[in-house]
Image (cartoon, rainbow, N blue to C red):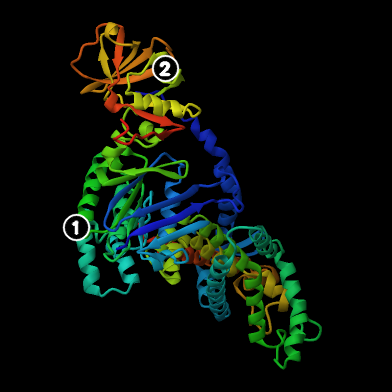
Amino acid sequence: MAEIRLAQLAHSYQDNPSAAEDYALRRMEHVWEQGGAYALLGPSGCGKSTLLNIMSGLLAPSEGEVLFDGKVVNALSPQQRNIAQVFQFPVVYDTMTVFDNLAFPLRNQGKPKATVEARVREVAAALEIEPLLTRKARNLTADEKQKVSMGRGLVRDDVAAILFDEPLTVIDPQLKWRLRRKLKEIHQRFNVTMVYVTHDQLEAATFADKIAVMYGGQIVQFGTPRELFEMPRHTFVGYFIGSPGMNLLDLEIVAGRAHCHGNELALPEAWHARLAAQENARLQLGIRPEFVELVPADSATLTGRIDLIQDQGSFKIVDVALTADPSQLIKVRVDEYKSLGEETVGLHLPEAWMRFYANDLLLEMSDEAV
Amino acid sequence: MKPYNNKAWWLVLPVFVLVAFSAIIPMMTVVNYSVQDIFDPSTRYFVGTEWYREILSDPRLHDSLVRQFIYSFCVLAIEIPLGIIVALSMPRRGLGVPVSLILLALPLLVPWNVVGTIWQIIGREDIGLYGSLLNGLGVDYNYASSPRDAWITVLIMDVWHWTSLVALLCYSGLRSIPDVYYQAARIDRASSWAVFRYIQLPKLKNVLLIAVMLRFMDSFMIYTEPFVLTGGGPGTATTFLSQTLTQMALGQFDLGRAAAFSLIYFLIILLVTWVFYTAMTHNDDKG
């Protein structure tokens, strides 16, 4: 059980990294608190697995330190760190039975027989693999094998943390959902720090209390699923979280006031001033499809033509091409029963849900200034 | 019903012809010889199982067979573990990989009789590199007069010649183990022995099966090396089955007896190989 701190951590697979692109992980500062259930979310190749392997000790970071409860563990092997890791594809010891597989990490620690027996039974019960215990691991199906792999990660109760590297990739969707629930239960029961790597936001949100979103070798935001949804700190988070992701519209400053495709935005003066001050940066307006409202065309300044309607079952996603610039599409989520009569519609963007980004980073306004 | 014809048999025919000429016809000829006593092409008598009965009770062959089994056992007992150790200590990446692969492949390229000649010279106690060295060190070594030394020399020759094959097979087997297995073992705090026992050895099983069978069959048929070294001597100390057979068939031109012997020889190899195969694979479907 431990708090894991990453201090000034960076990693490059090259010998002499110079440019920022040479780094798989860019310099970061981060803390995983003891007992938390965390997800590490990001697209393929963003450095998630690299970060995980550095925490477990399979990979030595080229810069910075990893601290477990304040102690630097850079030089320690995974064995010495006492950490558990579950890999993307099942790893089982073919010649052993399922029982022996689960008992393996405990026996390597020299635990007494009774403890081994009790822990193995407990974990097997939690993962619903009790009937398999006497079977040879070689003859299991892929998802049974993955359960055994996960079991080996869960069986030690004294580990600093359990790291999961996209563990449910090979599992079919139904079982996936059940296993995620199981993991959550196990987390609550054993109060052990868990970090769960995934590229699936749904998986991240159902498992974790807090999600770290990674992009280009950096953690761009660390927050609850709700924070990621309502207040993305980076345009990538806005775009990556939510389905579909956030609408992003380019802004231009005309005579000190913020305009979007030729229309001045209805904003308090303080915001106009704040945006105008960032005139040289790339300014963007972000708003989630859930918060855009469709209104009659004659009552809105921003208008567009309905380009495509995707029926998602309980709701529809409407693509609206702006009149001012038909190449700019705005996605709007509307209720299933709402009829969409006219082709040309007006768009209302509520001020409370507008987010502003300068060079992809969220612009914030302290409460007094508004 | 689908229309069908038997034209596909024509496609199988070449294989039948090939197998017939390469295996079945020669073997049936041997079977034919083994039940007859042949004096000349026109004077032959059917003798039934007489040759077989004689062979099975021939003490010269018994000795040779026992010697052969001891020899093959020694070859396997040395080459298989040694090959595994060599494979485990070979580099996994870098320049060392091609270098060690080439070095290991070299002995495999040397013909049998050359290997025999090399060791015959190296082992000579008067001028041989290691023969004279041993004697200079006070070790009484002479393969021409001591059966023990002749045995050791023939064994060393085989180990020198063929351990590479086992090592290369094992190396390819080790290379096919994904890194994630080693990572998982580190996470599970496995000792290096446990890594070998539970990850490497199970994954090596298939290549080891091939290595054991190849080395058994080959060593069980050894002929050239002892023949070149001492001609099977001193005495009959290194006279193995194939040499006994050759003496019988070509030296004495005792065709019927040699044919019966060949067939028994063949059946022994088949049987032992089958036993190895079954023993090493019978666990696969259990569990």
Looking at the picture, tell me which residue is in the foreground, B42 or B144: B144
User: With respect to residue A54, does B158 lie above or below?
Assistant: below
| Both labels 2 and 1 in a single chain | yes
Q: Horizontal and vertical percent for residue B229?
A: 72, 76
* Cα separation between marks 2 and 1: 49 Å
Mark 2 against mark 1, which lies toward the viewer?
Answer: 2
User: With respect to residue A30, does A120 lie above or below?
Assistant: below
On residue A328, which mark appears?
2
Q: The numbered mark 2 sits on a residue in which chain? A: A
Q: The numbered mark 1 sits on a residue in which chain? A: A
Residue at 27% in and 24% down: A291
Work out whether residue A64 can be spotted: yes
Looking at the picture, tell me which residue is in the foreground, A298 or B180: A298
Left or right: A267, with A124 as reference point: right
Query: Where is the N terminus of chain A found, in terms of image quarters?
Result: bottom left
User: With respect to residue B111, does B120 lie above or below?
Assistant: below
Q: Horizontal and vertical percent for residue B97?
A: 63, 59
As helix, strand or loop, the secondary structure at mark 2 comes to loop
- For this orientation, the residue located farthest to the right is B127
Identity of the amino acid at label 2?
A: Gln
Residue at 77% in and 82% down: B124
Identity of the amino acid at label 1?
A: Arg
Work out whether residue A140 can be spotted: no
Left or right: B242, with A262 as reference point: right
The residue under label 1 is A189
Query: Where is the C terminus of chain A found, in terms of image quarters?
Result: top left
Q: Residues within 10 Å of mark 2 (few under 14, many from 20)?
A: some
As helix, strand or loop, the secondary structure at mark 1 comes to helix
Looking at the picture, tell me which residue is in the foreground, A307 or A351: A351
Q: Horizontal and vertical percent for residue A15?
A: 60, 53
Q: Horizontal and vertical percent for residue A235?
A: 40, 32
Looking at the picture, tell me which residue is in the foreground, A114 or A336: A336
